[in-house]
Image (cartoon, helix red, strand yellow):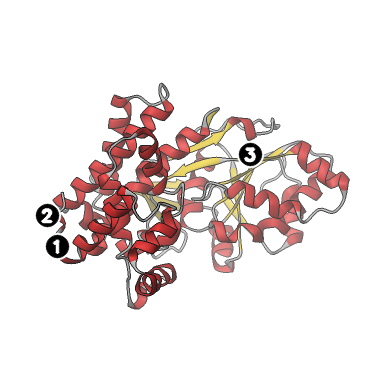
Amino acid sequence: MPSANSKPVAIHFGAGNIGRGFIGAVLSNAGFHVVFADVMEDIVNALNEQGQYNVHIVTNKDPQIETIKPVSAVLSTDLKAIEELAKKPVSIITTAVGANILPRLAKPLAQIIRTRMAENMGAVNIVACENLQNATEILREAVEKEFNDEKERRYMQDKIGFAVCSVDRIVPPFSSDNILDTEVEPFYEWTVDANSLKKTDPDVNIEGMHVTDNLEAYVQRKLFTLNTGHATAAFLGFVAHKDTILDSINDKSIRTVVSRALRESGAALIEKHRPLFEPKQHEEYIEKILDRFSNRHLKDKVSRVAREPLRKLKPGERFLGPIEMCREMNFERDHLLLGVAAALLFHPTGEDEDEEATELQEKIQKEGAEKVVADITGWGKEDDDLQKVIRKYNQLKSEHLDKLI
């Protein structure tokens, strides 16, 4: 564990591949001693024993290896260790645990806040780096429930920043002789809302973390481009019996649909957020996304990327979010609707079986696809877009994709 006189400390909850390969790496490269907090004893022990790990950055050219050090770790369930850690010169606390796990961080985070209050320490920022738009709000509410004392609540309000952010980096599953090593693509974006940050000492000025006054624009750009494209490639890949995203995007018909869907969502993004996003700049962003899917080293399984289709079909999410923007602006959206139709056909079996996919198929069998789409979207059954989805759904079941584009 670093002393108070050494590097500033960043605490990161979640020592999985994303934690080590993305957020932990960015913080380390920005000059922090990163202390990971996790429930996995083997990972915690390995981090403390080795004090470093390798991130394999893979491109279509030669891979590069980046060594992340110094690092250490504590068990996130060991509140005594968390208490001692809280006394260090910490200005930022981050998470990458998965949205469902966030409420479990309430107790260790409350312990950190109480310790800092007792030690009369300054402000600290907590940034939930999760692939969910309201992740920080979920975390803040869970931590608030740990405090009954008004003095503690006031300290939390004054001294603890719960910062909203958008994160983007593809970190696929990776196997290695060293359980700490990870594999990542070279591209990443970590964008944080300036208005939700507290001023800290040392202040949060982290190379690799982009601070903005218009986070919504960047959140939507990422969700409606990377996530929309990823999900479209995955669902169409499943229909076309592809194993990986790489296989999908290398299929000419699938790449055409993904590309056109991203230009449909892109037109709406540009219209809504102009002048922040301009056509030439956004076209370059789309091409970069397509290139990322084509990275021959990132053989991410279609079944993994497509999982949880009901979540992906929620209002405001990667399909209905850009579709609703296009509807409001009367913009083209046929290829986005084709992605929705493909999602209705996702039903992996065996070891890839997905609970939400099974639930979706059972609903379709029981109620019919038209009612299911109406319930998901809120559109009337006579709505043109709903009828297009149903037509494309029926066509995908019986025709090859290239006949639909």
In the image, 316 versus 383, the foreground residue is: 383
State which quadrant residue 162 falls in: top right
Kind of residue at disc 3:
Lys
Evaluate if marks 1 and 2 touch, with contact meaning CB atoms under 8 Å apart. yes
Query: Is there any visible trace of residue 84 in the rendered image?
Result: no
N-term-proximal mark, 3 vs 2: 3
Please give left or right for residue 150 compared with residue 170 in the image.
Answer: right
Q: Image point 29% across, 38% down: which residue?
A: 264
* Pick the front one: 39 or 363: 363
Crowding at label 2, few (<14), some or many (≥20) Cα neighbours within 10 Å?
Answer: few
- Label disc, if present, on residue 7 of the rendered structure: 3
Residue 137 location in percent, x, y? 63, 47
Q: Which residue is mark 2?
A: 403
Q: Nearer the viewer, residue 131 or 217?
A: 217
Q: Residues within 10 Å of mark 3 (few under 14, many from 20)?
A: some
The amino acid beneath tag 2 is Lys
| Residues under numbered marks 3 and 2 in contact, where contact means CB atoms less than 8 Å apart | no
- Give the residue furthest to the bottom: 350
Q: Is residue 165 visible?
A: yes
What is the CA distance from the residue labelled 3 to the residue labelled 2? Answer: 59 Å
Which residue is rendered at x = 65% and y = 30% of the image? 203
Q: Is residue 76 left or right of residue 274?
A: right
Q: CA distance from mark 1 to mark 2?
A: 7 Å
Of tags 1 and 3, which is closer to the observer?
A: 1
Q: Amino acid at mark 1?
A: Glu
Q: Residues within 10 Å of mark 1 (few under 14, many from 20)?
A: few
Query: Which residue is labeled 1 in the image?
Result: 399
Q: Secondary structure at mark 2?
A: helix
In screen coordinates, is 68 left or right of 113?
Answer: left
Q: Which mark is residue 24?
A: none
Is residue 142 depicted above or below 89 in this figure? below
